[in-house]
Amino acid sequence: MAQKKTKKKSPKIKKITNVVYERELLKLQNELVKLQEWVKYKGLKVVVIFEGRDAAGKGGVIKRITQHLSPRICRVAALPSPTEREKSQWYFQRYVTHLPAEGEMVLFDRSWYNRAGVERVMGFCTDNEYQEFLRSCPEFERMLVRSGIILIKYWFSVSDEEQERRFRSRLHDPLKRWKLSPMDLESLTRWVDYSKAKDAMLAHTDIKQAPWYVVNSDIKKHARLNCISHLLSMIPYEDLTPENIKLPKRQAVGGYIRPPITDQTFVPEIYPE
């Protein structure tokens, strides 16, 4: 009698504890502050692209990167759908305006790769426009690198089971419900189409001057730490932390008299009860 073949289960990955995660995240965020000062000091121009399927964890990583950084130095570019005027422009034009000047770092929460992903799968661009993107994107990125921009590209890889689990969790969480768009729901029914589009995108745009780095994002905390650690390793920097600063004495009041406090309108103090 033939024995039934049992499907082998993948070994369960041991998740990092919250205590260790918070400790390691704080260490990395301290290093990000040092990197920020180095970018400003050396006048570097840094672009970091975050791509991946919906609910892959891109936004969570971006939030942890920017949490303690100055928005004047490190900013996020998350562009909405193009206007009719932008649709008539050269495809890369609206992204160019968000590129960094010296001493700036820009994090693209999705980027020009929309054309190779959602636009391709959902039919928002023609075949000619798509093929032209695959031809011109590598040259566009080589041009950016030649101009002095440090270009780093991350693809967040999430399994179909984990993506669906995250979508379901958003259904009942009022703080995350806004994240679940009709486009997200449609992506579930087009999983294979998105996979094919991703494969073609990587094949055409994984260039020596700006390679793709894939982040396994099934476990969010692991993905955040691994991505930030890798980002720090991509830009050599030095610690420019200043010596201990001594606060000066506050200016003497002198003859200054404050206006009556009753002249001001205060926010009602509801808390603490």
Image (cartoon, rainbow, N blue to C red):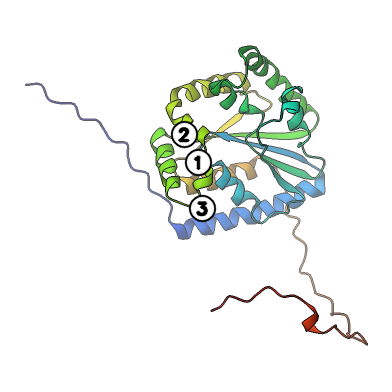
Q: Nearer the viewer, residue 257 or 48?
A: 257
Residue that protrudes farthest toward the right in the picture:
255
Q: Residues within 10 Å of mark 1 (few under 14, many from 20)?
A: some
189 or 220, nearer to the observer: 189
| Count of picture labels | 3
Q: Which residue is mark 3?
A: 175
Crowding around mark 2 (Cα neighbors within 10 Å: few <14, some 14 to 19, many 20+) is: few
Q: Give the residue number, with chain letter if any, for mark 1.
A: 180
Point out which mark residue 185 bears: 2
- Cα separation, mark 1 vs mark 3, equals 11 Å
Query: From mark 1 to mark 2, how far is it between C-alphas?
Result: 7 Å
- Residue drawn 49% across and 20% down? 196
Query: Which amino acid, by three-letter code, is at mark 3?
Result: Leu
Foreground pick, 71 / 79: 79
- Which structural element holds mark 1? loop
Q: The disc labelled 2 sits on which kind of residue?
A: Leu
Q: Is residue 211 left or right of residue 185?
A: right
- The spot of residue 143 in percent (x, y) is 77, 24
Earlier in the chain: of badge 2 and badge 3, it is 3
Q: Secondary structure at mark 3?
A: loop
Residue 164 lies in quadrant:
top left
Amino acid at pointer 1: Leu
* Percent coordinates x, y for residue 158 in the rendering: 46, 36
Label ID, residue 103:
none
Is residue 260 toward the left or the right of residue 135 in the image?
Answer: right
Question: What is the CA distance from the residue labelled 2 to the residue labelled 3?
Answer: 18 Å
Residue at left 47%, top 57%?
Answer: 20
Report the quarter where the N terminus lies.
top left
Q: Residue 78: name its quadrant.
A: top right
Query: For the point 80% across and 80% down, which residue is it?
Result: 263
Instruction: Check if mark 1's residue and mark 2's residue have beta carbons within 8 Å.
Output: yes
Viewer can see residue 53 = no
